[in-house]
């Protein structure tokens, strides 16, 4: 594989779900790419579509209730129209995945060792006589101190951090090129979170794999990501390198999120509040900049149609719509706290 | 500054039963001798990781759990026993907000019924007064009147959390125990709830015991902070004491583990974190006694206390962690 | 594991003692005694009183209770006052019949219930699913005795395909003919049970299959690239059988409680029918023995459940 070539390349990806007989758009025109050795963080609040994207890369949506359009290329394989049999050869081999809650993501009735070996038995990459040995090696690699003992244990006998380590061992059992981590540390304590993030970084650097990190935690993004994509209501509103997005955020949503985070500057003040809520799937009109609906003084701009081609104000830094050009926080409107009550209850 | 609630040497121990006859062989020291006090109109932060015992302390204060030993003193009166609480309307004055607003609100009840419940229990209002009070409460938490007869599932997470707050403030409480009140919420919604908690605090002079694992949120909300580890406090102080001048290795470790929103210095941050982690691993025995628990506290300044190191504890003659544990186990049988 | 079984067994002892006291009290509280039925204008009241006294029915209750318990320990369940036979002998034959009928019905319930639930859950919303769901909600809603009488009337009396009473035909001789005849007598009652009582098994399994399908660990398995077939059997089906396994002990015991109506309708000489007979004739010794037996079985059933659960579910396994 040539460095610089994209490992994962998504172009114009859309996902529709059938809900009560109606097709609703959950993901619209998503462009993303991950290079080998790159950590791309996909940030957004719940319902923004970030997990939906991850599931599309794995092709794990229920085919009867969903349809995926556009193009997702994974190391030269087109995923959007791949058959289930073709996908099975890619899952675990080209791309491994870890999830938010490692307790429910592990089968409670199966021993740890068996669950890791199942990864190998699904593919013929590791020869059968090496499964046992490889399992121990993997557990050791993810920092579990007594691998033989742990392989013989059940998930409930391990701590949360250990379970997530086991999940990582499962995901990398067949040496995939891409690791998708969907909120990998949200259920963990902060000290354990740091350890798991370090471990992911370490594995990523050592094996030069790409990581698609899905999270709502801006701190985690700032510590981990090489590049960042910010999602809102099923669309990417801004993407660029981590420096670009954190040092020079452009889109009103990115700027609002960064401002809502409690920090040293906000110590005795009220926090910045984004009024309103993310619209329901059925109320998403993706031809507009949906976030502007939540900015009281930009109601006019919220009605405008927006181009599907993002602007690129600096190289590699993309932003959707035009609102970023003249967006300013208005203290009159956003008098924090109770002053916003009226605006929110509408 | 008047003291509202004081916790004295609080202990909550759960027996561990093992063996053929299910005999008590050991105890889980969920909370093992903590002291602190909350002033009127102030927010006290209680920080710790899962299993540290922070939630247990909150449960003891609101009466969901019983103390094994120690005292809860409210406005100068001992309210450790349930009977003594009734006399001074303690249960009306002390309310709780939970982390998971979905499961802490009865799904079969309307917003009206949910908020009315504590009023039924503690105040004797006629129907008119009740209606008026509930509408007023809805107004306070910023929900429109038309939501009165809706059910919890019809609301977003942030709105549900505000319903939970409306229920908690219905009886004009003096103290609200908030157990991870924003952990399940998105950032934008979290800001709404935190602002709102601050607003009603100012307006009604409410005190909070703010229990959280999120140091960023705690720093934003609280004046005094206690850091808890393995059932004991390792450090108590004002916000500045704890964040700017952490003394205990565990506090340092916790602070170092918070992801910084600082892209340019991430390598330094990581190096610092790893250095602290190494210190924690290498010098564990200096900070934790033979049974693995932190040593007793010592005062540094008027506001700042920290758990002793082994040296200090030995000098003070209080290093007998194991002996103390054994004595307790015996006493419990 | 053995420790758990032993401890579970020891817990049963006080439960058993309590049960015998309750049973004894219950029997004593029922109106009448075995001799009441023989009372007519011609009976000599003094003879009856003498019989009562000789049977020990005039003794104080504690004496009677301890005599009963003492006898049980010596394997003596007493004599049936009415049938004039040792209760143990009476029970022996009947239990065998009931066990065969019960095992066959339970086996049929599982062979029908499990595949239909799997078919339903794997094709949720399809015609198959709707058919089996409707079938189960209808059959589950009809009272058992109505079904038994209907089946007996249709296949026994009208179509004459199956015998309508007894457990073996009188003219069957030799091992194979007797076995065949026994089986022939079992088919109709067993089928009547099986066809109409899959509802709880079906619903439990179908629901837990549907739940498991969207479980996180199933998603993990699919993300590994495991084949759908293996995902289904290793993860979905296996984990969904937990709630089914957790009631197996009670299902086994349910054989005996269900037998009362079943055997009465089909004229099948098992324990259930014996029980009904003993109640109507105030045959305390038989009645008590049967209640003691099925009570003990219930306790064993719940012990069995605990053991099965700790065996199949590592989360509750005791070290």
Image: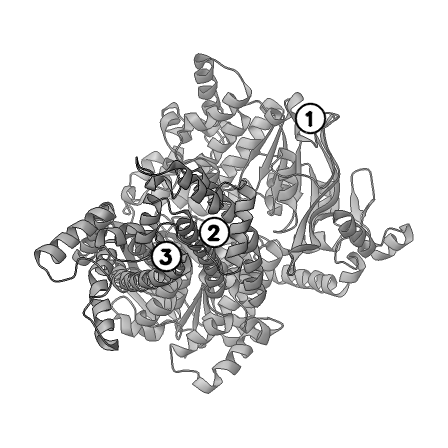
Image location of residue A273, percent across then percent down: 48, 37
Image location of residue A99, percent across then percent down: 45, 60
Please report the residue visible at 38 percent of the width from the left and 57 percent of the height from the top. C85
State which chain disc 2 sits on. Answer: A
Front in this rendered view, residue C16 or A169: C16
Q: Is residue B184 left or right of residue B217?
A: left
- Badge 3: few (under 14), some or many (20 or more) residues near its Cα, within 10 Å? many
Tags 2 and 3 in contact by the CB under 8 Å rule? no
Q: Which residue is mark 3?
A: C251
Q: Which residue is mark 2?
A: A216
Front in this rendered view, residue B96 or A306: B96
Image location of residue B263, percent across then percent down: 56, 57
C-alpha span from label 2 to label 3:
48 Å
Front in this rendered view, residue C30 or A114: C30
Q: Quarter-wise, where is residue C174 in the image?
A: bottom left
State which chain disc 3 sits on. Answer: C
Whether residue C152 is visible: yes
Above or below — where is C180 with respect to A340? below
State which chain disc 1 sits on. Answer: B
Image location of residue C150, percent across then percent down: 15, 50
């Amino acid at each position: 594989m040539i460095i610089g070539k994209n490992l994962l390349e998504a172009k114009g990806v859309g996902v529709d779900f059938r809900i009560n007989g109606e097709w609703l758009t959950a993901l619209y025109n998503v462009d993303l790419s991950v290079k080998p050795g790159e950590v791309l963080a996909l940030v957004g609040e719940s319902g923004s579509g970030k997990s939906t994207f991850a599931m599309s890369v794995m092709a794990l949506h229920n085919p009867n209730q969903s349809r995926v359009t556009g193009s997702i290329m994974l190391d030269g394989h087109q995923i959007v129209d791949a058959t289930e049999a073709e996908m099975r050869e890619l899952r675990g081999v080209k791309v491994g995945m870890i999830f938010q809650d490692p307790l429910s993501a592990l089968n409670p009735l199966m021993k740890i060792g068996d669950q890791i070996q199942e990864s190998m038995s699904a593919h013929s990459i590791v020869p059968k006589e090496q499964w046992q040995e490889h399992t121990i090696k993997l557990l050791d690699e993810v920092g579990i101190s007594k691998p033989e003992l742990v392989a013989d244990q059940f998930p409930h006998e391990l701590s949360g951090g250990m379970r997530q380590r086991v999940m990582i061992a499962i995901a990398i059992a067949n040496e995939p090129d891409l690791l998708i981590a969907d909120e990998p540390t949200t259920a963990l304590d902060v000290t354990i979170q740091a350890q798991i993030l370090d471990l992911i970084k370490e594995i990523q650097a050592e094996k030069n794999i790409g990581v698609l990190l899905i999270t709502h935690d801006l701190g985690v993004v700032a510590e981990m990501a090489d590049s960042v994509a910010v999602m809102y209501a099923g669309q990417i509103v801004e993407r660029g390198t981590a420096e670009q997005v954190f040092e020079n955020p452009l889109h009103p949503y990115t700027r609002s999120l960064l401002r809502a985070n409690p920090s040293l500057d906000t110590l005795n003040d009220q926090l910045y509040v984004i009024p309103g809520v993310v619209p329901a799937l059925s109320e998403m009109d993706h031809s507009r900049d949906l976030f502007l609906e939540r900015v009281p003084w930009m109601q006019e701009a919220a009605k405008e149609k927006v181009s599907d081609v993002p602007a690129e104000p600096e190289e590699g830094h993309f932003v959707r719509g035009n609102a970023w050009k003249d967006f300013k926080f208005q203290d009159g409107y956003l008098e924090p706290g109770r002053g916003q009550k009226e605006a929110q209850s509408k | 500054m008047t003291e509202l609630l004081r916790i004295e040497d609080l202990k909550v121990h759960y027996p561990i039963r093992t063996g053929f006859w299910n005999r008590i062989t050991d105890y889980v020291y969920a909370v093992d001798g903590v002291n602190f006090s909350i002033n009127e109109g102030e927010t006290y932060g209680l920080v710790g990781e899962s299993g540290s015992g922070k939630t247990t302390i909150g449960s003891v204060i609101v009466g969901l759990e019983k103390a094994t030993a120690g005292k809860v003193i409210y406005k100068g009166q001992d309210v450790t026993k349930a009977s003594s609480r009734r006399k001074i309307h303690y249960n009306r004055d002390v309310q709780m907000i939970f982390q998971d607003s979905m499961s802490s609100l009865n799904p079969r009840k309307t917003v009206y019924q949910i908020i009315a419940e504590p009023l039924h229990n503690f105040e004797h209002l006629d129907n008119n007064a009740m209606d008026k009070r509930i509408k007023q409460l809805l107004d306070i938490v910023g929900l429109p009147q038309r939501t009165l007869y809706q059910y919890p599932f019809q609301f977003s997470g942030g709105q549900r959390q505000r319903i939970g707050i409306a229920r908690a403030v219905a009886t004009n409480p003096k103290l609200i125990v908030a157990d991870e009140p924003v952990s399940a919420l998105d950032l934008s919604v979290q800001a709404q709830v935190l602002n709102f908690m601050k607003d009603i605090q100012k307006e009604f002079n409410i005190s909070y015991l703010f229990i959280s694992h999120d140091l960023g949120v705690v720093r934003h909300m609280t004046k005094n902070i206690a850091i808890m580890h393995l059932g004991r406090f390792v450090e108590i102080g004002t916000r500045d004491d704890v964040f700017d001048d952490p003394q205990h290795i565990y506090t340092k470790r916790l602070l170092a583990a918070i992801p910084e929103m600082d892209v340019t210095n991430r390598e330094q941050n990581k190096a610092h974190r790893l250095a602290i982690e190494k210190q924690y691993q290498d010098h564990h025995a200096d900070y934790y006694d033979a049974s693995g628990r932190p040593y007793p506290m010592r005062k540094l300044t008027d506001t700042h206390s920290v758990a002793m190191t082994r040296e200090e504890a030995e000098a003070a003659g209080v290093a007998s962690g194991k002996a103390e544990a054994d004595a307790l186990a015996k006493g419990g049988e | 594991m053995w420790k758990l079984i032993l401890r579970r067994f020891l817990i049963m002892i006080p439960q058993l003692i309590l049960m015998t006291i309750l049973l004894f009290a219950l029997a004593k509280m029922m109106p009448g005694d075995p001799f009441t039925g023989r009372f007519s204008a011609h009976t000599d009241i003094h003879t009856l009183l003498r019989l009562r006294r000789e049977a020990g029915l005039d003794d104080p209750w504690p004496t009677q209770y301890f005599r009963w318990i003492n006898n049980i320990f010596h394997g003596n369940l007493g004599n049936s006052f009415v049938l004039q036979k040792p209760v143990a002998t009476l029970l022996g034959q009947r239990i065998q019949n009931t066990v065969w009928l019960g095992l066959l019905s339970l086996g049929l319930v599982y062979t029908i219930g499990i595949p239909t639930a799997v078919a339903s859950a794997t094709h949720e919303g399809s015609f198959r699913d709707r058919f089996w769901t409707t079938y189960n909600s209808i059959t589950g809603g009809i009272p058992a005795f109505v079904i038994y009488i209907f089946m007996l009337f249709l296949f026994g009396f009208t179509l004459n395909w199956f015998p309508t009473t007894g457990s073996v035909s009188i003219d069957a001789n030799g091992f194979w003919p007797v076995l065949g005849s026994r089986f022939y007598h079992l088919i109709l009652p067993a089928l009547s049970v099986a066809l109409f009582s899959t509802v709880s098994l079906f619903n439990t399994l179908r629901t837990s299959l549907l739940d498991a399908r969207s479980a996180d660990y199933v998603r993990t398995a699919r993300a590994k690239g495991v084949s759908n077939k293996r995902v289904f059997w290793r993860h979905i089906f296996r984990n969904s059988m937990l709630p089914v396994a957790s009631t197996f002990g009670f299902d086994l015991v349910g054989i005996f409680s269900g037998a009362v109506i079943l055997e009465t309708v089909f004229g099948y000489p098992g324990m259930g029918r014996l029980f009904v007979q003993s109640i109507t004739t105030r045959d305390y010794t038989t009645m008590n023995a049967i209640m003691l037996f099925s009570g003990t079985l219930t306790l064993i059933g719940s012990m069995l459940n605990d053991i099965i659960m700790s065996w199949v579910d590592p989360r509750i396994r005791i070290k």
